[in-house]
Amino acid sequence: MRAQAIHLNTLIKQNNPETIKLDENHIPHITLLQGFINEKNLPIVKDALNVLFKTIESDTMQAESIFYYKDKEESFAMIVVEKSDQLLKLHEKTIEIVKPFIVKNGSEASFVPNPDGSPISESTIKYVPEFVEKYSYENFDPHISLGVAQKVLLDSLTENVFNQIQFQPTSVSVYQLGDHGTTRKLLWKSD
């Protein structure tokens, strides 16, 4: 799955060099939760998530399709991952574990700075504390982000490159986010 996501992203970057690049600084992933957590509480969260990973490490997930807006000339694209009962339970259990430690008062300083020195977007700062309320449970949208490209390329990638595949999780991780919710700084990865 990781190789397919990186391959699709590489082809998208050839079309739009300004879009995200999936690599060691932007890991292909499924976001289970976003939130602001005090650094002092990370050891407790990490221990609980490590136990959680042991319960799902042999689960299978399904990459279903590439989603993009087909009525636009250019669109953000992502690999849609089946919202299976097991993935939904993982999402819900992650929230159950982490929610007691989530704080609402994050700021631009909570994020990994943009390499070019530009400010973290206001939309990113507002999105993170709203994740549980607005983007979870029935609104959970499991996917792997690929980037922005022309519709014509995305049509071709969907038809000629993308493969529906099953895959297994390799870890549960905690990242410090960058702008647009990107995974920028690895803080912890399950054993």
Image (cartoon, rainbow, N blue to C red):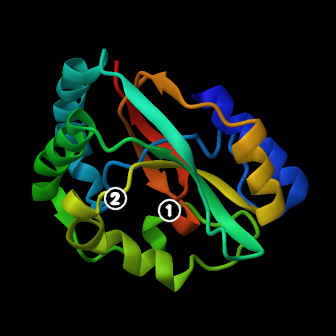
Callout 1 touching callout 2 (CB < 8 Å)? yes
Is residue 98 placed above or below 1 in the rendered structure? below
**Coordinates of residue 17 in the picture (x, y in percent):** 86, 59
Q: Residue at x 20, y 58 (%)?
A: 137
- Give whichever of discs 1 and 2 has the lower sequence position: 2
Give left or right: position of 128 versus 137.
right
**Coordinates of residue 174 in the picture (x, y in percent):** 38, 42
Give left or right: position of 171 versus 105.
right
**Coordinates of residue 29 in the picture (x, y in percent):** 49, 41
Mark 2: which amino acid? Gln
The residue identified by callout 2 is 34
Whether residue 90 is visible here, answered yes or no, is yes
The residue identified by callout 1 is 181
- Nearer the observer, 155 or 63: 155
Circle 2 packing at 10 Å, graded few (<14), some (14-19), many (20+), is many
Give the spatial CA distance, label 1 vs label 2.
Answer: 8 Å
Q: Residue at x 56, y 31 (%)?
A: 164
Question: Residue 120: which quarter of the image?
Answer: bottom right
Could you tell me which quadrant the N terminus lies in? top right
Question: Residue 20: which quarter of the image?
Answer: bottom right
Mark 1: which amino acid? Gly
